[in-house]
Amino acid sequence: MRRRLLLAWYLLCMVPLIALAAPGRDPFNYFFNDTFGNFADELQTARHEGKQGVLLFFEQADCPFCHYMEQNVLNQPEVQAYYRRHFLSFPVDILGDVAITDFHGRQTTEQEFAKVNRVRATPVFAFYDLKGKQIFRYTGSTSGVTEFMLMGRYVVDGTYRKMPFVRYKREHLQ
């Protein structure tokens, strides 16, 4: 009897929390920015809008880790708001044959661009400064929203210049 009461109490407490948990919003509408694939122009836009830089999400269609990030992290409103405030963000299909212009104005394809950037495994989050120089790169999925938000702050605050992300993470996730 006592067990049933505890279970009932637990369920009554958890139901409101579950109801408050947002299912998330489509990252392709709320996290990523629209682009015509000209990253040189996107740098100018980022400068004009006062952004910190550009974030590229290197992905591929059947990548379970990419899917995890899209369905559990990039779809969260707090993540979308923070990253939209500080970066222009774009997906890049590492197997794609879509024509793009790189940060230096060279014509290429998504696939060739990924090769030049040495992207083999996905996902890869590559942060670029306003001159088109890669300043930080993270390969793989994060453990969740907290770690991904921490990564954004690591870049925005400029801590990437002072210490590795592993150390920063250890100091901030204790």
Image (tube, grey):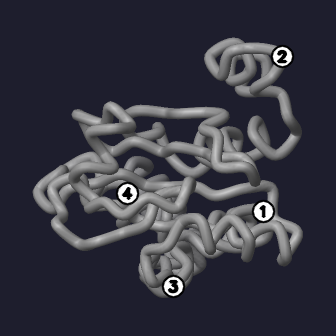
Q: CA distance from mark 3 to mark 4?
A: 52 Å
Q: CA distance from mark 1 to mark 4?
A: 49 Å
Of mark 1 and mark 2, the one earlier in the sequence is 1
Residue topped by disc 1: 86
Closest to the camera, between mark 3 and mark 4, is 3
Closest to the camera, between mark 1 and mark 4, is 1
The structure residue drawn at horizontal position 66% and vertical position 39%, both measured from the top left corner, is 151
Q: Amino acid at mark 3?
A: Asp
Instruction: Estimate the x, y position of residue 152 in percent, counting from the top left.
Output: 70, 47
Vertical position of residue 5 compared to residue 114: above or below: below
Query: Of helix, strand and loop, which one carries label 3?
Result: loop
Instruction: Estimate the x, y position of residue 105 in percent, counting from the top left.
Output: 52, 62
Q: Amino acid at mark 2?
A: Lys
Residue topped by disc 2: 162
Of mark 3 and mark 4, the one earlier in the sequence is 4
Query: Of helix, strand and loop, which one carries label 4?
Result: helix
Q: CA distance from mark 3 to mark 2?
A: 32 Å
Q: Quadrant of residue 68?
A: bottom left
Of residues 174 and 156, the one drawn nearer to the viewer in this rendering: 156
Q: CA distance from mark 2 to mark 4?
A: 54 Å
Dots 3, 4 in contact, CB < 8 A: no
As drawn, which residue projects farthest toward the left? 62
Dots 1, 3 in contact, CB < 8 A: no
Query: Of helix, strand and loop, which one carries label 2?
Result: loop
Of mark 1 and mark 4, the one earlier in the sequence is 4
Q: Amino acid at mark 1?
A: His
Residue topped by disc 3: 34
Query: Of helix, strand and loop, which one carries label 1?
Result: helix
Vertical position of residue 170 compared to residue 154: above or below: above
Q: CA distance from mark 1 to mark 2?
A: 20 Å
